[in-house]
Image: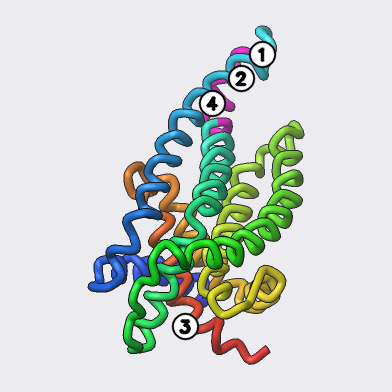
Amino acid sequence: MTGLIRGFSYVFRGLGLLTRKGIRGFVAIPLLINILLFAGGIWLAEQQADYWMQHLLPDWLSWLRYILWPLFVVVIFFAVFYGFSLLANLIAAPFNAMLSERIEKHLKGQPLPAFGGLATLPGIAARTFRSELGKLWYMGKWLLLILLITVIPGVNLIAPFAWLLYGAWMLAIEYVDYPMGNHELYFQDELQVLKRQRAHALGFGGALTLMTAIPVVNFLVMPVGVAGATVLWVDRISKDPA
């Protein structure tokens, strides 16, 4: 429980760093990408929730729609938001890596580096995209299981809880990758460390998951996630004895 609470707190600590001098300028692009894609995600989630409720059940079971509506809304919104979150992070990966680097140097009291210009982006992009593809494969495997739980009658009653747990774990993996990637530690290294720091990771990812469900606040998930994950890296993960 202590680990969950501390993990949860890293989101607020990350949020407090985004307006610091030398950091706030690197928040703009990830924030803009997140706003555009989340706006699209909200529109798609609304469309899909209505479509599936109209077509999934036969007419003679239409009375169940009123009972299942809250369940379907939760499941579809989480599914769409996670998908759009992954897409947003893939597009913004190079910018998130630079944001994480500057936050880490700020936390350690080191001078912030000068921006190297657009010429630095290809190298950062190649490094981060390799890691992103590894994460997508891992997330996709677990996603299939969650989708099966969602469509099996009876079992799907636990689907919202399964989505919450899946989202918390995957968001922790997604954002901790940035500070670790800056130190040449990639997905397999990250996965092993997070398993040892499971409570902190789930607390941190759970807080981000809650943010995705709050209108307007969810636009901040990406930069807050990068910042919070960097604080988590500096405080705990970089000191992991194994």
Nearer the observer: mark 1 or 3; the answer is 3
- Are dots 1 and 2 in contact, CB under 8 Å? yes
Image point (53%, 75%), residue name: 182
- Circle 3 residue: 234
Residue at 53 percent of width and 62 percent of height: 122
The 10 Å Cα crowd at callout 1, few under 14, some 14 to 19, many 20 or more, is: few
Query: Residue 167, image x and y in percent?
Result: 58, 53
Disc 3, SS:
helix
Q: For residue 90: magenta?
A: no
Query: For the residue marked with disc 4, what is the amino acid?
Result: Ala
Dot in front, 3 or 2: 3
* Residue that badge 2 annotates: 64
Q: In terms of sequence position, does the residue under pointer 3 or pointer 2 come before the other?
A: 2
Label 1 amino acid?
Leu
Mark closest to the chain's N terminus, 4 or 2: 4
Type of the residue with mark 2? Leu
Is 63 one of the magenta-colored residues? yes
